[in-house]
Amino acid sequence: MRQLFLAFFMGVTLCLHAQNGYFFPNKKFNPSIPTPEQFLGHAIGDYQTRYDRLVAYMYELDRLSERVQVKVIGETYEKRPHLVVFFSSPANMAKLPELQNEHLKLTDPNTAMPDVAKMPVFVQLGANVHGNETSGGEAMILAAYYFAACEDEDAKKMLDESVVLIEPVLNPDGRDRFVSWVNQHRGTPLVSDNNDREHLEVWPGGRTNHYWFDLNRDWYLAVHVESQNRLKFYHQWLPNVVTDHHEMGTNATFFFEPTKENAENPLVPQYVYKTLNGKFAKYYEKALNAIGSFYYTKESFDNLYPGYGSSYPDMEGGLGLLFEQASSRGFVQDSPNGPVTFAFTIRNQLVCALATCQAAVDERPNLLKFQREFFASAISEGNKNPIKGYVVGESVDATRLRRFTQTLLHHHIECYQLTDNLTIDGKVYEKGKALFVPTAQPQYRLVQSVFEKPTKFADSLFYDASAWNLPLAFGLAQGEVRTPIAKGARIGQEFMQSTVTIPTKSPYAYLLDYSDFMATKALYRLVSQGILVKVATKSFKIGDKSYSHGALMVPVETQNLSPDALYEAIKAAGQEAGVSFVGVPTGYSQMGVDLGSNTFQKVTKPEALIAVGQGVNGNEVGEVWYWLDTHVGMPITKVDVGMLPRLNLSKYNVIVLVSGQYDRALAPKIKQWVANGGTLVTLKTASEWAIRSDIVKEKLRTNTKADSTALAKRGRINYEDAVASEGSKNTGGAIFEADLDITHPIGFGYKNRKIALYRNNNTFLEPSASPYNTVVQYSDKPYLTGYVHPQSLKKISSSAAVVIAPEGSGRVILFSDNPSFRGIWYGTEKMFFNALFFGANITTPNPLGGE
């Protein structure tokens, strides 16, 4: 028995040494706390850890250590628990609510300054927002073990003076998708060849969440449940330091901040970039030098966009820190710097995570004082601003105003009801249909991010977007308030509730104004039940209400269900969508067409297909899928692009092609399907493909002779400037003004012809030869905000944004841009919905004298 015990003890000791020797040399640990290797059954770095096993280990640490507390902050779309794990000394853990309350006083300049000498610093370590960048997530497992079990005095001191919040995986759904892939393709021995299947994920890969969105762009937009979970938790604690652990190309080394100097957010105090970044960088330099790892700084990445995990904390009085590790994308991969092993990438992430905590403890008084100064200066700068606030309104579409307001509330931005109607620049903002956002508030800097329209930039190369004005994204009117006004009641969650009026039961027909964004959801619910719905192509007035193009009419007597059953279906559709139908007793109008007019056309239920797979833009597919799932309740069939040549397309009446590379050989089949009556909807480069493949006769706007002359006149440019020179011509994300034909089926439900479009591509469409088929056209001076190269702006001006191309009995609807961008562009998404639902209703006569 003694020999058996000795053998077991030796096995545990060897396991502990094997695990800790590489990651934690010369550290002492509590032997009653299992190492990750002991619990998981494999050494960290030998396999990729499934998320459920990671979660189980965190709960095991919670069970065994007084230093640990697991908190579930929500769940993902795929029902995985979303965790944050707290670590601190037992004394601190026993009084977490008290520490939380004291800490939050730093964010309220109206309260007395707490005694920072007695306060811990709050550090949040976050990783794996991109699901296939798993080294950070594995490093969080090791960091959790370190904080739970390390017995060294420096570790105990760190826990005495800090509360560490670990969000081990920001994107659990994407991580498990990737982990499953690499584990099932793991070789024995390991294969380092870059061409091995292990290193080449199948489309769409694990980077994104369930809906194939990049969650590292969503802190600001707050579209997805993971981000909403995170923001709710974040504002309950407002940590002083937040890390964001990523991976990059295998041929790189390791990046830590500072980022490019000319890509800093001008709203963030320079103390963050010039002082704190520099101080923390010294800790990373020391930690990586100690293990012989190479690194670089200052050359790439940016802090301009406020919606990254490493930039959002800068807008909240904290310090956000980005780490980028050259990826093994599996277990080992060849690179010019030698083989990159998974364990090596994990160790780099780990030492920087621990160095962050040490730096935060050493800088604790400065970080705590800065947080108070940040929010105090926010209010003082807001008071100095000649703009006293912004007013935002929408008179006919309550949904868009509510959804915009919800985004503000996610960020704890104060907003108020109007006490009376307010007129600014000739626009009347109605009480009850508008809100006021003051600038003098703790979230002043985020308020400026939401409403500003920057036009000048220090750089012409952007890692992501250069414009993010939210009223423009939601299609809302906004005005600057330059004189003090009385504020009404502060807006809270009660504002999010829709008010639905139950219609009077009618023996004749029911009408629905189509201007509310959620009207499409009600429409789909009805047509999916086989209920006849007609859409008005002319305006009219019945009773005391006027209806515009796109109004929906549901007749009573021509249905396949009883009037009572129809009434219940109408009520249910309205309540589910949050819109109000009106029962009318007559078809005779006081103005415009009567309900029996042929200008009311039957709406056909969309049977939609979207191409997916290798070469197709997964983000854009995911955006379409997300909008239809969450805002319409409509399924769309996702078909691999490789199946299309042999697929029977006759069961579908709508096909959507987002940006991608499509085989020209597919074009004749698609063209014939369109000619047979189908509606093809194309976005961006798919629109280019449709034109170049002769599916349609429309034209692309290309370089002119003047462009070639200008290029020749530039003369020689240094080789090192080539990337910057050419990259500046990319339209990476800017906003432009266009004119929308609101009488066209694509424009149904819109009241204003002026529309803001988001553009992050260089697809340029010429206006149609037919005067009726350019549904949306950029104005001659379209620029609103964001960076755009002068040559690109010239091409955008007066170009077409949406063109209808008739073909036989069908039509192609070409978008030069992406109306579904990141699930936030409510202002343009309705056009896409209209393309799906009303495309079959588009019939354009040939102009007199035309072909």
Image: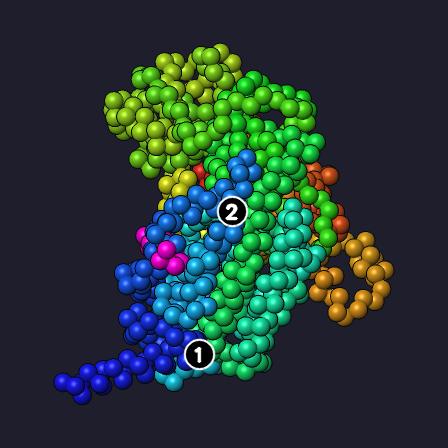
Could you tell whether 558 is left or right of 284 in the image? left
**Direction bottom: furthest residue:** 3
- Residue 247 visible: no
Q: Do callouts 2 and 1 mark residues in contact (Cβ within 8 Å)?
A: no
Residue at 51% over, 56% down: 242
Q: Nearer the viewer, residue 615 or 772?
A: 615
Report the quarter where the N terminus lies.
Answer: bottom left
Amino acid residing under circle 2: Asp
Q: Which span is picked out in magenta? A: 79-91
Q: Residue at x 61, y 36 (%)?
A: 379
Disc 2 packing (10 Å; few <14; some 14–19; many ≥20)? few
- What label does residue 25 carry, if any? 1
Is residue 85 found inside the magenta-colored segment of the image? Answer: yes
Residue projecting furthest to the left? 1
Q: Label 2, label 1: how many angstroms apart (C-alpha)?
A: 37 Å
**Would you call the spot at circle 1 few (<14 residues within 10 Å), some (14-19), or many (20 or more)?**
few
Residue kind at label 1, given as amino acid type: Pro
Q: Which residue in the structure is indicated by mark 2? A: 115
Left or right: 560, with 672 as reference point: left
Q: Position of residue 132 (x, y in %)?
A: 45, 65
**Which mark lies nearer to you, 2 or 1?**
2
